[in-house]
Image (cartoon, helix red, strand yellow):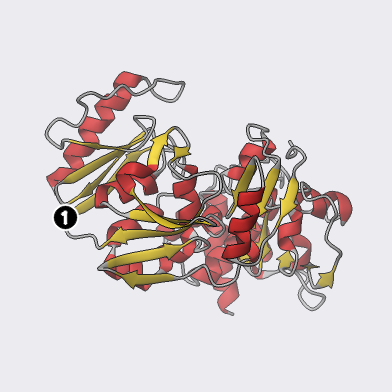
């Protein structure tokens, strides 16, 4: 499987979750693990460009696919991805535990709706839980990310 | 929380999948995994074998047939949500699939997997029942059609045999007026109770071991929903009456 553009061997144990594989085998600890049953959204990664829960995917299922984690969003040319930049500008985080999942969900949301309505923003981030911000600053960050992504 | 040990099989054709299912005891089919993997993580399910059908090519089509829309085994819920065919032929299904969890879950979860999982609080089994659709099951013994009113037999139990693979679901075209309305604590949560109206037919979900057809004039008659921390049985009956009233007000 390819993770952030690098090819890695598939783990031998089929019960290894993709979230655990990323964190424990590949050392990519930016993918956070909260509830481990698909509710909190912290472990969201991109699978072939679409956001999915890495805790609900067996690592062996990612064989032959491209996984993008939070570590893979920014490039050398741009130290922050537009969505990361927007979360930074709008203070779309406090403790930061949920942030990688939010950022990758929002990347998926903006791919689907480049100019999301407030309803589409709410729908797009409804699957991610944040216990700090109360979501107001995250909503602002999503609209700001849409602006930054257009530039 | 980690899945218990299991043997993993990843067949690449439907025929191979059916042969594998026929040869194994205690196997579970893995499609989108958005219900099965949580059950594994909680160890509520401990199958000896996981048969992953995601390596099978070309079983993710959504197409028109027999005056309705057919959705194959690996069509993701997000694809159903975005499908122009579904929106044109069966807009009730488009409306209902948007209520299934969240977009990120729907990116992976499949419609057929949702039906085979048969959660009593799920929207899609009730849509299949309200419209009078069916599913197609394949095994090495052949192929058979299971009508919606014969498919759901209990809480997370269906008429599918252990060696059968649900390869396709078929929904008749939906006519106006239709509605799918549910009440849940948070957007995307399982419904405390929900109703599906297809013209004069009414199906309820979240209030019985399976989705059930009901009389729109007296929808709560004969129901004995369970009560839990989220809602008492009485409150669920109240919701059935109120939601049915809303669905049939239009």
Q: Which chain carries label 1?
A: B
Relative image position of residue B11 (x, y in whole percent): 67, 62
Foreground residue among A43 and B108: B108
Instruction: Using residue B185 as the reference point, say whether residue B247 is left or right of it.
Output: left
Instruction: Using residue A54 as the reference point, say whether residue B230 is left or right of it.
Output: left
| Mark 1 secondary-structure assignment | loop
For the point 16% across and 52% down, the residue is B199
For the point 63% across and 62% down, the residue is B16
Asked if A105 appears above or below B161 in the picture, the reply is: below
For the point 54% across and 49% down, the residue is A127
Mark 1 — residue?
Answer: B177
Query: Can residue A38 be spotted in the picture?
Result: no
Instruction: Using residue B167 as the reference point, say whether residue A99 is left or right of it.
Output: right
Q: Which residue lies furthest to the front in this view?
A: B141
Query: Can residue B48 be spotted in the picture?
Result: yes
For the point 23% across and 60% down, the residue is B174
């Amino acid at each position: 499987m390819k993770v952030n553009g690098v090819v890695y061997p598939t783990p031998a144990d089929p019960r290894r979750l993709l979230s655990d594989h990323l964190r424990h085998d590949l050392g990519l600890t930016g993918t956070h693990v909260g509830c481990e049953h698909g509710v909190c959204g912290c472990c969201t990664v991109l699978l072939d460009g679409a956001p999915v829960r890495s805790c609900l995917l067996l690592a062996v299922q990612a064989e032959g696919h491209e996984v993008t984690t939070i570590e893979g969003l920014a490039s050398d040319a741009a130290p922050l991805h537009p969505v990361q930049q927007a979360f930074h500008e709008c203070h779309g985080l406090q403790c930061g535990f949920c942030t990688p999942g939010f950022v990758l969900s929002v990347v998926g949301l903006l791919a689907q709706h480049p100019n999301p309505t407030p309803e589409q923003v709410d729908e797009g981030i409804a699957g991610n839980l944040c216990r700090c911000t109360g979501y107001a600053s995250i909503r602002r960050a999503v609209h700001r990310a849409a602006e930054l992504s257009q530039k | 929380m980690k899945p218990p040990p299991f043997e993993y099989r990843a067949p690449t054709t439907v025929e191979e999948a059916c042969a594998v299912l026929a040869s194994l005891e205690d196997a579970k089919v893995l499609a989108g995994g958005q219900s099965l993997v949580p059950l594994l993580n909680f160890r509520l399910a401990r199958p000896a074998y996981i048969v992953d059908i995601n390596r099978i090519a070309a079983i993710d089509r959504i197409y028109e047939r027999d005056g309705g829309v057919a959705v194959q085994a690996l069509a993701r819920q997000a694809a159903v949500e975005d499908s122009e065919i579904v929106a044109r032929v069966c807009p009730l299904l488009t409306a209902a699939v948007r209520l299934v969890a969240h977009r990120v879950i729907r990116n992976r979860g499949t419609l057929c997997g949702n039906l085979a999982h048969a959660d009593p609080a799920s929207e899609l089994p009730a849509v299949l029942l309200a419209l009078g659709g069916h599913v197609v099951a394949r095994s090495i013994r052949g192929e058979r059609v299971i009508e919606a009113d014969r498919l759901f037999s209990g809480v997370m139990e269906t008429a599918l045999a252990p060696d059968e693979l649900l390869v396709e679901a078929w929904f008749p075209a939906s006519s106006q007026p239709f509605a799918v309305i549910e009440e849940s604590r948070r957007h995307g949560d399982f419904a405390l109770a929900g109703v599906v109206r297809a013209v004069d037919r009414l199906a309820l979900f979240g209030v019985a071991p399976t989705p059930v057809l009901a009389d729109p004039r007296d929808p709560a008659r004969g129901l004995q929903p369970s009560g839990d921390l989220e809602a008492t049985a009485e409150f669920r009956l109240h919701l059935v009456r109120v939601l049915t009233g809303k669905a049939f007000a239009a």
